[in-house]
Amino acid sequence: MDKPEDLLLDVQHLHTGFRLGDDYYDAVDDVSITLRKDEILAIVGESGSGKSTLATSIIGLHDPRNTKVTGDILYNNLNLVGLNEALFDRIRGKDIGMIFQDPLAALNPLMRIGEQIEETLVYHTKMNKEERESRVLELLNQVGIPNPERTARSYPHELSGGMRQRIVIAIAIACKPPIIIADEPTTALDVTIQAQILDLLEDIQREMHSGIILITHDLGVVAETADRVAVMYAGQIVESGSVMDVFKHPTHPYTRSLLRSMPQTDSDDDE
C-alpha cells in the first residue's frame, strides 16, 4: 500500500498554453499525474503529443511572456505553478534534476566536463573546492565513465554521444535530487548504448530511491524500464496505469494503435 510520504510530485489539472496571436494554444490540456518514491513513471506519446512540454512545465522552463501555465504542481508543500523564479531556481537542479535528449546542446562547448558538473555543486551545496572535485570524480564513476580524471579535463566535443549523455546524467544527479525527469534520454543513441543508459537510470533510481519521469515515444523502453505509464495524445493523458495493465488491457484506441505498432517477437506470436 502506498504511503503518503512516498508521494514526491502531484500534478493536478495542468494546462500549458503557448501564445498564438491574441490567444493561447494548450499543448498540455488538463493533465493530472503523480510520481512516487522508488518508481519510474513513463509518459509515452508521439511527437507533438505534449509530453516534453509537460516535462518542461514541471521544471519551470517556459518563458512567462509567451506561455501560460495553470493548475497545480505540488512538491514538498509548494505549488511550483507561479512560484517565484528565485525560489524555483533553488529547486531546479537540487530537488528536480533534468536529463535532456540532446546532450551536445545541453552542455557548454567552451567548458571542461568537470567544471560543468562542479557548477551545479557550487550553486546548490556548501562543498569546498576539494569536496566538489572529489564529488565530480565520484559522479563520473557512478555513471560509468572510464578514466574520470581525464574525462573531467575534456570538452564535450571530445566525447562520444553516449559519453555525453552520461555526463548530462551526472549533472542531473549531482545533488541527489528526489525527482529526475529524463526527456527522451536515448533518442540519438544506437541500440546498444540505449540499453546501457536505461540500465544506468534504473541503477540510479534504485540507489537514490528517487522517482523518475521518463519521457519517451518508445513502448519497448516503457516495457523494459517503467513501473507505471501514462499515455499522452493531443495534450491529454488518455490512459494510465501499471505497465502490465495498460499493455495487456488497453482501453483507449490510441493506446491500442501504439501497441499494434510495436515489433512482435517470435515468442509473442507463439503465445
Image: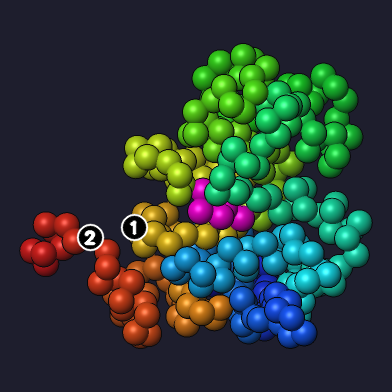
Write down the quadrant of residue 196 in the picture: top left
Q: Which residue is mark 1?
A: 220
The N terminus - image quarter: bottom right
Looking at the image, which residue is at 80% across and 34% down? Answer: 119
Q: Which residue is mark 2?
A: 263
Q: For the residue marked with disc 2, what is the amino acid?
A: Pro
Image coords of residue 122 (percent x, y): 85, 34
Image coords of residue 170 (percent x, y): 63, 36
Write down the quadrant of residue 16 in the picture: bottom right
Residue 56 is one of the magenta-drawn residues = no
Give the secondary structure at mark 1: helix
Image coords of residue 35 (percent x, y): 61, 66
Label 2, residues with CA under 10 Å away: few <14, some 14-19, many ≥20? few
Q: Is residue 185 visible?
A: yes
Vertical relation: 177 (above or below) 46: above
Vertical relation: 246 (above or below) 140: below
79 or 261, which is in the foreground? Answer: 261
